[in-house]
Image (cartoon, grey):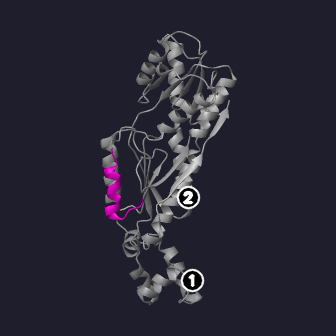
Amino acid sequence: MQHKVPTIQEIARILNLSKSTVSRALRNHHSIGLRTTMRVQKLAKELNYEPDQTAISFKQRKTFSIGVIMPSFETYFCNAIYGIEDVAHARNFNVLIGQTREDYEREVKIMETMRKQRVDGIITSMSKNTPDIGHFLKCRQYNIPLVFLDRVPDVPDINSVWCSLYSSTLEAISLLISRGHKRIGLIEGPPTLHIRNERLKGYLDGHRSHKIPVHDHLITTTDLSAASTYAAMEKILSSRIKPTAIIAFNDYVSLDAMHYIKKIKKGSPSISFVSYSNLPSTEYMDHPPLASVEQFPYEQGKRATELLFRQIDGMSRPEMTPMENLILESKLVIH
């Protein structure tokens, strides 16, 4: 047997009140007396009345939801999502989450779905395989604010939150040199990720400041897969001048690199590694990286959501709501 969903009309009929009076009483409107408000809310509770969110959204032109598009749900991006959710839930907003799995076509499809759902705003961290951001910029046609997080494209006039890696990379070079390393390798990430330039710049400037020669053959890239990292390690270790230390794109790349040395080359992980992300799991490793750069993903997620809400709240006066580019400072953590 189906039960009718209780409505404002039904409450109004039972209490012999107008629909507008019931509606105001449910919202604790100051124009409705306390006694009437209490009668309305008591009956609404007894009937298990719930507001029609669709009607509310239509009236206020909001869905009270934001979309989040992440490359994966690994620890780093999950921490960013925690920051996003904490801010969104404090504003009574729902968070719709999509995972691209580093796939450009999937990213485009998720983005289109978010737009059709008419979310009030979107936070995204780009796939490593994204060749352009045209699908993201379509948000402007639909007046949907967009904030890029962590993986930020190198284009003007966008909202973004990311963590600068330059100073920490300089510190990493200084740390390695202080430990006696003068042949330092670098495993970079995919060229589509703009943030990669800070690692390379810090690496090169760090060598120059210490008057240590840069060996070009010790600089290589990975697409972040284990197979690609193995190939990068093979290239570095097959050279005549071998590195005594390696700076890796992130903790996962350093793990794959160390696994290559131990399992493929059948050697001990005598090379010192410095990486990025500072995942909590490194504390439990027998041979953790010498150091890792903390990029504060939770704080990035929090700041990105606060920025998104500033953009959402300013939709009525866009001329008073400029684009923002927020840069956090990373921190080198020695293990």
Going 41% across and 86% down the picture, which residue do you hit?
19
Measured along the vertical axis of the image, is residue 217 above or below residue 125?
A: above
Left or right for 10, reference 185: left
Which residue is label 1 attached to? Answer: 38
Q: Does the magenta stretch include residue 97?
A: no
At which x and y percent is residue 30? 56, 87
Among the two numbered marks 1 and 2 on one chain, the one whose residue lies closer to the N terminus = 1
**One can see residue 61 in this view:** yes
Label number found at residue 322: none
At which x and y percent is residue 198? 52, 38
Measured along the vertical axis of the image, is residue 70 above or below residue 318?
A: above
> Tag 2, which secondary structure?
helix
Going 63% across and 21% down the picture, which residue do you hit?
287
Amino acid at pointer 2:
Val
| Quadrant the N terminus occupies | bottom left
Left or right for 255, reference 189: right
Measure the alpha-carbon separation of dots 1 and 2: 32 Å
Which residue is at the front of the view, 27 or 39? 27
> Tag 1, which secondary structure?
helix
Amino acid at pointer 1:
Met
Q: Give the range drawn in magenta.
A: 132-145
Which residue is label 2 attached to? Answer: 87
